Each structure stands twice: as structure tokens, then as C-alpha cells.
């Protein structure tokens, strides 16, 4: 079987704004204090709130934020809770309301964060979302991956590596998070299209690396008929691949996951993870800041799709060359 090794399954580019989104931009009224800073040519202060700055994915986002701050000549602070803490994220944002000239946010929970996004917008501070969207809020634009579509791509990959039949366990570090729900929706849609594939369960592993591995190990012991593990994020992917490696099970259990952590890249090279999907986190961090700067300068903005990059053993060397 040959999985087409394309760097971008969905091209990075602009997603046109809906009429509703365009009205949000037209109706937005900038706070006088921010307009005065722009008119005076003073440096802008952008805050980028990520839903868990302690996870292994966060440094990639932060690198993009720092690059944008340098390129756009603004102050850009990467903030957020340690651990997925909606109350902590809300409290931090509210504390900084009087300082921020723009906010980019990846919500711990869309329901919990939508009201604070709307309050920031009402205060005349522009808000965009990144990584995890909050479309029901009044945010102005989104930079990131189409999460449902990326879940579908993962499901299709899982179907391919299993040859259309098998028992699949879905793993996630936070089953209640909107990004996880969206990805799982897409993955289940794709897997349902294959009558020979059964989704056995969704395993909520939590975020601690040791507990992630233990949860997967215990689940595999409890159900040895599982032949596929589909991870929805960065951090249970290497844990699933490590389980395969330690149990010498690469011919029996297939793993499809997300992101390009160093450990995941190595596991793909060694054949213990069959495929991983990149969502261009550095580009997401960059675009989050850049969208706000463009908007504050009076330039038009659109949603930014950072694409679905598919990597297998056939093309993972391209990632290694870039590092």
C-alpha cells in the first residue's frame, strides 16, 4: 500500500470570510486609547493566549509569535494557563484588558471563553482566534487548521493503514475540549465509511506523559483485539508509538496521530507510528499576531487555513532535514 506522501493535503492559504464574519469586522469599533497609540506611532502590545502553555506543542506556537513580533515590530506576549484551566485563562485575560491592544486566543473551552472574547471585543480590543476556533463568539478571524477536516484525514489514514478492517481506539489528552470533539467528529465520520472498521472506544488520557502511556498500556491489555490507535493530538501519539515499539507490535497495531514532536518523528522513521499529521503550529502563532497587526493598520483580513500536512515513513526525512 502506498500512502500518498504529500506535504500539504490541504493547501495553506486564505479561507474567505462568511457574510456574518464580514459584518463583525465592519461593526467593530476600536477603543480610543488604541487608536491614539496607532496615530502616535507607538508600539502595539499584542497578547496571545494559548489554552495550555505547559504542553509539548506550545513552544512551536510561541516561536511563531516571537517571529511575528520581530517582523511586525510589535510587542507580543505568549500567555495562558499551565494545564487546561478555563478559569485561569479567563482571569489572566481580564487582568490584562487595560494593557492589550489586540488579543489572539486558543480557547480551553469554547463555551467558557466565548463570553470573555465578546467582552474584549465590546471594549474595543480586536480579537482573533488561533489553533482552536470559537466561531460562536464575536472574534474577527481564525488562523489554524480545519479541525473536523483534519480528523477526517486522520480517519482516512487509519482506514488505509488497516486495509479497511480492524478495531480502533481513539486517544486524546482532553476528550471534553472543543478541538478534541471536532477532530473526533471528523475521525469517526471517516472511519464509519469503512464497514470493516469498528471504533472500540475513546480513551481520555489526561496530560501527564507517564499517565498517558499508562492509560494506553492498560487499555491495550484490557482489549488485545485493538489493531489501530488513532491519536487526536501531539502528546498521545508518541505514547502510542512507544507502546508499539516496546511490545514489538508494529505488524499488529497501527498508529496514526498528530504533530511533529521529535519523538513522533523518530517513531515514524522507525515504523512504530504509521502516519502523523502536521498542523503548522509555528505558522499559526505567526498568523495570530500578524492578523491583529494588519487589522490595526486598517488592512483587510481573512481566516488563515494552515493546512493538513501528512507524513509517513516515506517522506518524514523531509522534516528531519529542516531541523
Image: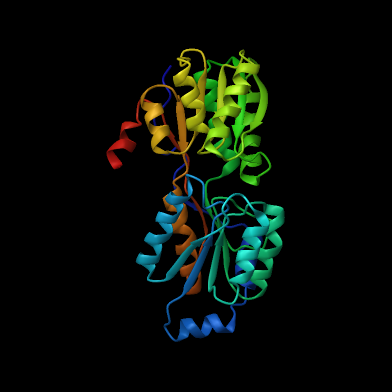
| Viewer-nearest residue: 19 or 134 | 134
Which quadrant of the view contains residue 146?
top right
Residue displayed at 60% across by 68% down? 25
Taking the spot 37% from the left edge, 71% from the top edge, the residue there is 73
Percent position of residue 188, x then y: 65, 30
In what quadrant of the picture does the N terminus appear?
A: top left
Report the colour scheme.
rainbow
Residue 229 locus on image (x, y percent): 56, 24
Q: Is residue 286 visible?
A: yes
Percent position (x, y) of residue 59?
43, 51
Give the vertical position of 33 relative to 297 (above or below). below
Task: Report which quarter residue 94 is drawn in.
Answer: bottom right
Q: In the image, residue 238 lies at what x, y percent? A: 47, 31
Name the quarter where the C terminus is drawn.
Answer: top left
Disc tally is 0
Q: Is residue 313 left or right of residue 200?
A: left
Using the image, determine if residue 197 lies above or below residue 206: above
Query: From where the camera sits, is residue 300 visible?
Result: no
Is 273 in front, or is 21?
273
Q: 28 or 92, which lies in front?
A: 92
Q: Residue at position x 67%, y 53% from top?
A: 110
In this rendering, is residue 288 above or below 188?
A: below
Tell me what residue is drawn at x 48 percent, y 50 percent: 58
Amino acid at each position: 500500500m502506498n500512502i500518498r506522501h504529500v506535504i500539504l493535503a490541504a493547501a495553506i492559504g486564505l479561507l474567505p470570510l462568511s457574510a456574518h464574519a464580514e459584518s463583525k469586522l465592519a461593526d467593530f469599533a476600536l477603543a480610543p486609547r488604541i487608536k491614539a497609540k496607532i496615530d502616535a506611532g507607538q508600539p502595539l502590545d499584542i497578547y496571545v493566549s494559548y489554552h495550555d502553555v505547559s504542553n509539548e506543542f506550545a513552544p512551536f506556537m510561541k516561536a511563531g509569535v516571537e517571529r511575528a513580533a520581530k517582523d511586525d515590530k510589535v510587542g507580543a506576549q505568549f500567555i495562558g494557563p499551565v494545564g487546561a484551566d478555563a478559569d485561569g485563562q479567563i482571569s489572566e485575560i481580564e487582568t490584562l484588558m487595560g494593557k492589550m491592544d489586540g488579543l489572539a486566543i486558543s480557547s480551553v473551552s469554547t463555551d467558557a471563553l466565548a463570553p470573555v472574547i465578546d467582552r474584549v471585543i465590546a471594549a474595543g480590543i480586536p480579537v482573533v482566534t488561533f489553533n482552536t476556533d470559537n466561531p460562536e463568539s464575536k472574534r474577527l478571524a481564525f488562523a489554524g487548521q480545519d479541525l473536523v477536516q483534519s480528523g477526517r484525514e486522520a480517519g482516512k489514514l487509519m482506514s488505509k493503514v488497516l486495509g479497511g478492517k480492524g478495531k480502533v481506539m481513539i486517544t486524546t489528552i482532553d476528550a471534553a475540549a472543543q478541538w478534541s470533539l471536532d477532530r473526533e467528529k471528523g475521525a469517526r465520520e471517516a472511519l464509519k465509511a469503512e464497514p470493516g472498521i469498528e471504533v472500540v472506544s475513546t480513551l481520555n488520557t489526561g496530560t501527564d506523559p507517564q499517565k498517558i502511556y499508562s492509560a494506553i498500556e492498560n487499555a491495550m491489555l484490557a482489549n488485545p483485539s485493538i489493531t489501530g490507535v488513532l491519536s487526536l493530538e501531539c502528546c498521545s501519539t508518541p505514547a502510542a508509538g512507544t507502546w508499539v515499539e516496546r511490545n514489538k507490535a508494529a505488524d499488529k497495531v497501527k498508529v496514526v496521530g498528530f504533530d511533529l514532536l521529535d519523538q513522533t518523528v523518530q517513531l515514524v522513521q522507525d515504523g512504530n507510528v504509521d502516519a502523523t499529521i502536521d498542523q503548522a503550529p509555528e505558522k499559526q502563532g505567526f498568523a495570530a499576531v500578524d492578523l491583529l497587526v494588519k487589522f490595526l493598520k486598517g488592512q483587510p483580513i481573512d481566516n488563515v487555513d494552515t493546512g493538513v500536512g501528512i507524513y509517513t515513513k516515506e517522506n518524514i526525512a523531509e522534516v528531519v532535514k529542516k531541523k
